[in-house]
Amino acid sequence: MRAIILAGGQGLRLRPFTEDKPKPLVPVNGRPIAELQIEWLKSAKIDSVTFLCGYMWERLKEHFGTSFNGVSVDYSVEESPLGTGGAIRKALPNIPSGEENVVLMNGDVITDLDLANMIRSHIAPSTPSSASILLVPYKSRFGIVYIDKLKVIRKFEEKPVFPDVWINGGIYIINLKKISRHLPEVGDIERETFPKLVTYGEVTGYPHYGFWSYIDTVKDLQEAESQLRVQQGN
């Protein structure tokens, strides 16, 4: 099975780390994000990865070449930004026709999600869908203040997690044949494609309560490194 990694952005909020490299090569505890992703994908029997890239894509190719850790690697390069949906559409001719379902993920997400289970859920006859989306509980970036009816402060809670409020976790299992006609020439799959599929009841959510990190800023990077050290017992 193939994975597609969205890696075309400039990572402006991660500067200075992205001044000389694309975001997937930013190290997390000494390992580039994309290395961690490919090893995680391999654990779910993913044997091919396509990077949808643009900004400093040559650095990606210099680092990974045509394979990494037993996983074949190739590249679909944007000459100008196409958005996530447009980038996928551009890459379709390079993906073998036999690849019906693929893993699609943002190039800045790391997680301990059991991807193999998510794949099995997506392809199960009981839940046929064009796309399955990883859902993770919303975690506030800010502390919460609780007040009573008289506006007296009763409690502070630092960055709470809301287990019944879900956000898009940036990892998908998609059926290329079913979604290809809904992909824009230029535009994002999250805004252009998924909303159309939702109207047909063709999108399934896959909730995950475990470790998940979205590395968009320097602060995100620091928090991800800290969480990974705790997970690994360091």
Image: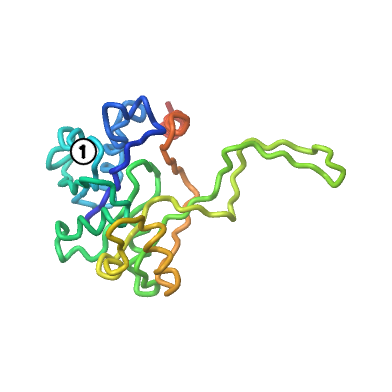
Q: Is residue 196 above or below residue 213?
A: below
Q: Is 91 situated left or right of 223 in this image?
A: left
Q: Residue at x 42, y 30 (%)?
A: 225
Q: Is 121 situated left or right of 5 in this image?
A: right
Percent coordinates x, y for residue 43 in the rendering: 28, 47
Quadrant containing the N terminus in the rendered view: bottom left
Percent coordinates x, y for residue 178 in the rendering: 29, 70
Q: Is 146 situated left or right of 7 in this image?
A: right
Given residues 147 and 35, the one toward you in this image is 147
| Circle count | 1
Q: Residue at x 15, y 33 (%)?
A: 62
Q: Is residue 97 above or below residue 81?
A: below
Graded by Cα atoms within 10 Å as few (under 14), some (14 to 19) or many (20 or more), the crowding at tag 1 reads many
Q: Is 58 situated left or right of 85 in this image?
A: left
Residue placed under numbered mark 1 in the picture: 57
Percent coordinates x, y for residue 223 in the rendering: 47, 31
Percent coordinates x, y for residue 174 in the rendering: 31, 62
Given residues 87 and 231, the one toward you in this image is 87
Indicate the colouring scheme.
rainbow
Q: Is residue 60 above or below residue 198?
A: above
Q: Residue at x 39, y 31 (%)?
A: 14
Q: Residue at x 45, y 72 (%)?
A: 199
Q: Residue furthest right?
A: 150
Q: Residue furthest left?
A: 66
Mark 1 secondary-structure assignment = helix
- Name the image quarter holding residue 39: top left
